[in-house]
Structures are given as structure tokens and as C-alpha cells.
Image (spheres, rainbow, N blue to C red):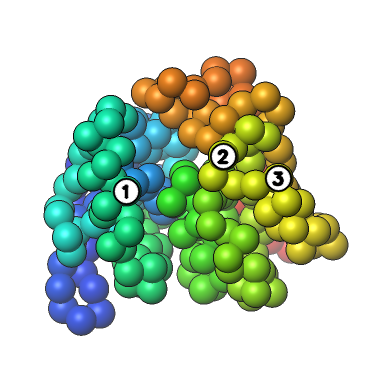
């Protein structure tokens, strides 16, 4: 894969890094891939490469850079402890600004020939939702975004297509929260709210015990379908 770390510049003149993965053709629509609490680790970089193989230019910005650059945690007890600590200290508003920098960076790159979406997992799922509300992206995918129920007012600010994946047995996201979120988007035709029976939070990550191959494959297929519909180039008349 054609993956590398690149430097990103903030409006304040600071810099941080992100992992960029290019498709085999060299060009395509853009995806800002938003990390879990484990950083832009091996799993997230591999997911970036996966979507690059599907024809997208994928950038995963390092959102923990102000605390500890290039966090690369595993899924053991120590990794969870450090990751939760970093998440607790993360400034949400600054994280959204960094994701916006990522989106703008993609739009400015010659490899990006179309629209730009956000796609996030867990902590990144919440941030993808909030990025959609900020108006920085053309579409948004959120995998089991814990905490979205605390930001329901922002739903009215989301005008782009959005896809939300939830796990039926997710201990971090109550069923009542999923119901509330689904009701908010019930009349938005380009909003997909999908639930996966019998699986737990983190079902997409093959490095975690709750990984479920069937649900992960189904959700990924639906994500690609969503992107193919809403990230397609505008048809010329």
C-alpha cells in the first residue's frame, strides 16, 4: 500500500501528523478516518489501507498529538487504561478543528478528485457525528459513537448524508439512546441508522474479543454502498 505519515498545519501555525493512504489509481474521493481511543494504531492504519484499496484517498489525523504524538496502543488492559485517560483529556472542540484541518488538507491535495467524508469508530464515531454538524464534510459514517445522545441538539445542524452503525448489546450506548437518535433522523431521507443484533461495541475491530466477522462485513458493505451513493461525482447535464 502507498501509505505514509504526512504533516498537517493548523490555522494557528502549529503542525501535527496524519496517516495518508492512497488508492492504487492514485486518485479518488477523500475520507477523513477518525481514530478510536487507541490512537492511529496498526488497526486504524490498516482500515485506512482497506478503504484506499476501494478507491478512496484516506487520511487519519493524529488527534492525541497535543498530549502524546503517534499513540499506537493495543487492546490489552494497559492499552485500554492509557486510551481512556487520553480520551478523558481530549478537547472535543480542538479535535473537531483538527479533523476539519484533515478535511481541508484532503480537498487541497491533487489526488482528491471528489467529495470528502468522515468515518469514525467509537470515540471517532462521536467525532464523525460532530464533524457532520460542523459542516466540514460531504458525508459522515459513525460506528458505535458513544456519547452521541449527549449531543442530540447538533442533529439539526447535520445537512449532509449520515450513516450510523450501532451494536445491539453495546454496554456503552443504551438502547434508549439508539432509539432517540433514530427518531431524530427518522424523516431525513439520507440518514441511515442501522443496528446489528447480538453483537457488542467494537464489533468491527478484528483485534478485539468482540469482533464479529459477519457483522463487520455487513457494516463495511453498507458503508461502501453509502459512500458509493453519496460520494459519487455530480452528473453533468
Q: How far apart are marks 1 and 3 (CA)?
A: 23 Å
Please report contact status of discs 2 and 3: CB closer than 8 Å, yes or no: no
Residue identified by numbered label 3:
175
- Left or right: 104 as drawn, with respect to 154: left
- In the image, 144 versus 169, the foreground residue is 169
**Quarter of the rendering containing residue 72:** top left
Considering only vertical position in the picture, is 147 above or below 95? above
Residue in view at x 67 percent, y 24 percent = 198
**Quarter of the rendering containing residue 86:** bottom left
Residue identified by numbered label 2:
171
- In the image, 99 versus 36, the foreground residue is 36
Q: How far apart are marks 2 and 3 (CA)?
A: 9 Å
Residue in view at x 15 percent, y 54 percent = 68
Badge 3: how crowded within 10 Å, few (<14), some, or many (20+)?
some
Q: Which of marks 1 and 3 is nearer the N terminus?
A: 1
**How many numbered discs?**
3
- Left or right: 187 as drawn, with respect to 148: right
Residue placed furthest toward the top: 213
Name the element at disc 2: loop
**Quarter of the rendering containing residue 133:** bottom right
- Look at the image and tell me in which quarter the N terminus lies: top left
Residue placed furthest toward the right: 187
Badge 2: how crowded within 10 Å, few (<14), some, or many (20+)?
few
Using the rendered image of the protein, determine whether residue 109 is visible from the camera's viewpoint. no
- Left or right: 199 as drawn, with respect to 58: right
Residue placed furthest toward the bottom: 12
- The x, y position of residue 188, in whole percent, is 79, 62
Q: Earlier in the sequence, mark 2 or mark 1?
A: 1
Residue in view at x 49 percent, y 24 percent = 210
Residue identified by numbered label 1:
84
- The x, y position of residue 102, in whole percent, is 34, 61
Q: Distance between the residues labelled 2 and 1?
A: 16 Å
Amino acid at each position: 500500500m502507498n501509505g505514509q505519515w504526512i504533516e498537517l498545519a493548523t490555522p494557528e501555525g502549529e503542525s501535527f501528523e496524519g496517516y495518508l493512504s492512497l488508492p492504487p489509481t492514485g486518485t479518488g474521493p477523500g475520507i477523513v478516518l477518525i481514530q478510536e481511543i487507541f490512537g492511529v494504531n496498526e488497526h486504524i492504519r490498516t482500515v485506512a489501507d482497506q478503504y484506499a484499496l476501494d478507491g478512496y484517498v484516506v487520511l487519519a489525523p493524529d488527534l492525541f498529538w497535543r498530549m502524546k504524538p503517534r499513540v499506537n496502543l493495543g487492546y490489552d488492559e494497559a492499552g485500554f487504561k492509557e486510551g481512556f485517560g487520553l480520551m478523558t483529556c481530549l478537547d472535543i472542540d480542538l479535535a473537531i478543528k483538527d479533523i476539519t484541518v484533515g478535511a481541508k488538507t484532503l480537498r487541497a491535495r491533487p489526488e482528491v478528485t471528489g467529495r470528502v467524508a468522515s468515518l469514525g469508530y467509537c470515540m471517532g464515531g462521536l467525532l464523525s457525528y460532530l464533524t457532520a454538524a460542523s459542516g466540514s464534510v460531504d458525508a459522515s459514517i459513525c460506528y458505535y459513537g458513544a456519547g452521541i445522545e449527549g449531543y442530540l441538539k447538533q442533529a439539526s445542524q447535520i445537512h449532509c448524508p449520515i450513516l450510523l452503525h450501532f451494536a445491539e448489546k453495546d454496554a456503552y450506548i443504551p438502547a434508549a439512546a439508539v432509539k432517540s437518535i433514530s427518531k431524530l433522523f427518522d424523516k431525513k431521507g439520507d440518514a441511515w441508522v442501522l443496528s446489528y443484533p447480538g453483537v457488542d461495541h467494537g464489533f468491527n475491530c478484528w483485534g478485539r474479543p468482540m469482533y464479529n466477522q459477519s457483522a463487520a462485513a455487513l457494516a463495511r458493505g453498507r458503508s461502501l454502498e453509502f459512500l458509493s451513493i453519496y460520494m459519487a461525482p455530480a452528473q453533468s447535464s
